[in-house]
Image (cartoon, rainbow, N blue to C red):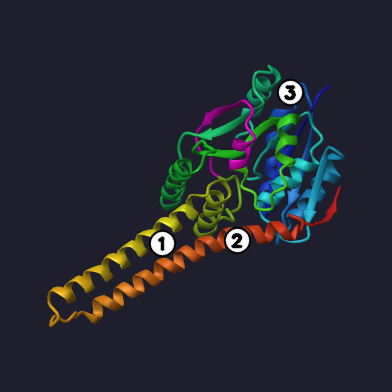
Amino acid sequence: MKKLSIIVPCYNEQEAIKFFYPAVEKVVAGLEIEAEYWFINDGSKDRTLVEIKQLRKQIGDKIHYVSFSRNFGKEAALLAGLKAATGDFVVVMDADLQDPPDLLEQMLALLETGEWDCVGAKRVDRVGEDKIKTFFSRSFYRIINQLSETQIVPNVRDYRMMTRQMVDAVTSLGEYSRFSKGIFSWVGFRTKYLEYHNVKRVAGETSWNTWQLFKYAFDGIADFSLAPLNLAVLIGSFSSLLAIAGIIWVIVRHIVDPTSAIFGWASLVSIILLIGGLQLLCIGIIGRYIGKIYLQVKKRPIYIVEEEA
């Protein structure tokens, strides 16, 4: 019998775990497949690890966990789970049950046909979510798909079931800064998406705020596109041409009318501040890429495991 590995990244999910396992196991029990659960405790500050250990004590060796020494982020937790999984098929799910377990049966059936290597889940709406986050999310997908050669399907969650071949391809990538949505698309393989309506969290609160989502989005763009660097070049080129045109205009005006005087200190200061701001923007964009290179060449581990079972 083939095996299914269920990867569950957890950060402060003590309230959700007690609901997660019964809901998922109810579906998995009806599948003709052996299952294992891998809970990845991403440095939670609550009783998440305690709840996982209690679940393992109740259920047995079917439940596994990896606990980090501190919070390394969901991308690190996702990678740790994919590396730990031993199944022929691997599925990634959130502990808050926003990923409907009912889709597992259809996902597995599609993969077993051999026609697909990955089956993901795509939300058809965002009912119940903050409107500002929804706006920025839609804007992000439009921007990154315009800037990057790697196309990312909008409204697709990390919830997906993959074959062992695809999982091995994903874990083989040694980059320090990881953006899984882009990586899943970049490695290729035949992927099908199942649509579903948005589901609210079963318990607890999300640990993602607007600023964290913004940084995550920028990292995704920087990881899969050089467009920000090209933008810095264009801004610098435009500013230089504008400055040259201004110098030529001043010289010509002085030749035509030597008695003329150039007034407008306020406008001059504004222009200087504008150009200075554009320069800092370009330096900041370049600095972000250099920072990613710096983190990569240091070769620090993406995460540190404190305990596992």
Q: Where does residue 274 sit, x and y in percent of width and height?
A: 34, 70
Residue farthest top in this picture: 113
Residue 187 included in the magenta stretch of the image:
yes
Tell me the quadrant of the picture where the N terminus can be found: top right
Instruction: Specify the segment rendered in magenta.
Output: 182-200
Counting residues from the N terminus, which is met first, the one under dot 1 or under dot 3?
3
Examine the image and state in which quarter residue 182 appears: top right
Q: Which mark is residue 236?
A: 1
Q: Amino acid at mark 3?
A: Leu
| Secondary structure beneath label 2 | helix
Q: Which mark is residue 31?
A: 3
Examine the image and state in which quarter residue 3 appears: top right
Q: Amino acid at mark 2?
A: Ile
| Secondary structure beneath label 1 | helix
In the image: residue 171, left or right of residue 102: right
Q: CA distance from mark 2 to mark 1?
A: 18 Å
Q: Disc count in the image? A: 3
Q: Nearer the viewer, residue 86 or 200?
A: 86
Vertical relation: 297 (above or below) 179: below
Q: Are marks 1 and 3 in contact (CB under 8 Å)?
A: no
Q: Where does residue 31 sit, x and y in percent of width and height?
A: 73, 23
Vertical relation: 159 (above or below) 33: below
In the image: residue 142, left or right of residue 86: left
* Residue 173 makes an appearance in the image: yes
Q: Are marks 3 and 2 in contact (CB under 8 Å)?
A: no
Vertical relation: 69 (above or below) 258: above
The residue beneath circle 2 is 290
| Secondary structure beneath label 3 | loop
Q: State which mark lies toward you, 2 or 1.
A: 1
